[in-house]
Amino acid sequence: SVLSSACGQLAFPPGFRWGAATAAYQVEGAWNQSDKSPSVWDHFIHTTPGVVADRSTGDVAADSYHLWRRDVEMLEELGLQFYRFSISWTRLVPNGFANVISEDGRRYYDDLINGLLESGIEPIPTIYHWDIPQRLQNLGGWTNPLVSDWFAEYARVVFSLFADRVKYWVTINEPSVFCEFGYGAGMIAPGIKDQDIGKYMCVKNVLMAHGKAYRVYEREFKGKYSGKLSMANHFMWYEAETEKDLEVAELIRQFQYGLYCHAIYSQAGGWPTVVEQQIAANSRREGYSFSRLPDFTQEEKDLVRGTFDYMAVNHYSSRTVRKQPSAEHIPASNQFTANAEFNATYEGKEDWPKGNSFWFLINPAGLRDLLVWLRTEYGDIEYLITENGYSDVTSKINDDDRVDYHREYLKQVLLAIKQDGVNVTGYTAWSLMDDFEWVEGYTLGFGLYHVDFSRAERPRTPRKSARYYASVVRANSLDVPEPQDVML
Ligand code: GBH
């Protein structure tokens, strides 16, 4: 890289903000505490044995429902400016609908938010991180168009209780992941396999849900609290494998990013034209009388367009894209390695090291390329990195690979800011602590803190990466000494 420690090149701009993230189902536990009702994850885990690598559940997880004070203390130890956590829909609104608010649920999030503020840490709540009420799933969940109204009502409850203390919100986390894998590939909750139709119904309804929640905030809360809202998308970086693949790589970016961003961030609104046309053509060829990608009316486009105050960016890994001559070359419904709409396959480069999660390839430059692509496509807006991190076996305390990952990815953030002028205002490490990693259970962790899941007390221990991150945060710079090993 062209950055050196001379002349403060490794320093982040003054006011750059640092945080760490978790999500409710992955850390809270207390799955049936008080009047909480089951979410799709409670239901999926309890009714689908073998779906999780180590057959574990999030029933107790890191027990943050009881240990949140320790979590706040860890954020203080790291010297962070904000904590991104998520609110459990069924803990706050056990009915699924907004007619009943749980006293205990309200108190839990009140306590957490007040505890953070007392420690000078800004709360950044995610309103939805994958745990829709099972009751609503029984009524179709994210495939029922009414879900956008149900979500907006739930969001109104959240705003009415907490908006007085929150400046940054994330509405919905990674629709690409829960639509593609929850309603398409069926490998995460609610486990529905419907690549052709269900996945796209989910995407449209999520965009409408986000749009309606944004409008609720805008009408009823923004004047008073002037908070900023964004949906958080998951952006794997996709680049062409060879010169011949440049065109298909751009189509894949329009598919993997544009499906979730275009309706919100573009001037025109609605779907990216190339994606809309391709899926319509594929649908016709397959004998459908309609496009498998649901239409937007002009009114719906107007409702969703412009519903952002910043862009929340989650990023971990990269892929190369290669064009395939025909559908026969596409492994049947394999979302990890192929795209069936555009006849493309995904791979990695030889010099991109493999991580420990099955999907993980390390390519730090991909984050810079992504940020530049986003700014070119969606404009010179505020970008906040809301997730970035590295998974490893949880037993490791001296986690040098995680230290390297954060350092190398942060260098690319610096290059994007300083050389490319992208307005990145903050960085969030995923994750504050080891957690329930969805279908990977507790076999891997992303935590700056180790959590001992074999002990009822769920003790947390700072890893070497926690020391490193704290020193970077303190200096607001990568020009810091190498962290010392943690002595055990
Ligand atoms: C995030 O998911 C989640 O927001 C968070 O809850 C989770 O704990 C964290 O990452 C770490 O896993 O098609 O090859 O990518 C984003 C990462 C995206 C990883 C979907 C698994 C499926 C396989 N996930 N991906 S692939």
Image (spheres, grey):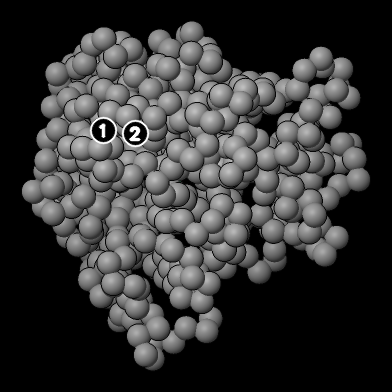
Asked whether the residues under the numbered discs 1 and 2 touch, taking CB atoms below 8 Å apart as contact, a structural biologist would say: yes
- Residue 41 in percent (x, y) is at 42, 24
* The C terminus, quarter of image: bottom left
Residue tagged 1: 221
Q: Is residue 49 above or below residue 274?
A: above
Residue 155 seen in the figure = yes
Q: Which of these two is toward me, 119 or 406?
A: 119
Q: Secondary structure at mark 1?
A: loop
- From the viewer's perspective, tell me whether residue 332 is left or right of residue 456: right
Residue at point 56%, 17% (across, down): 143
Residue at point 73%, 53% (across, down): 250
Write down the quadrant of residue 340 in the picture. Answer: top right
Disc 1 to disc 2, C-alpha distance: 6 Å
Amino acid type at circle 2 is: Glu
- From the viewer's perspective, tell me whether residue 442 is left or right of residue 143: left
Write down the quadrant of residue 258 in the picture. Answer: top right
Q: Secondary structure at mark 2?
A: helix
Amino acid type at circle 1 is: Phe
Which residue is farthest left? Answer: 118
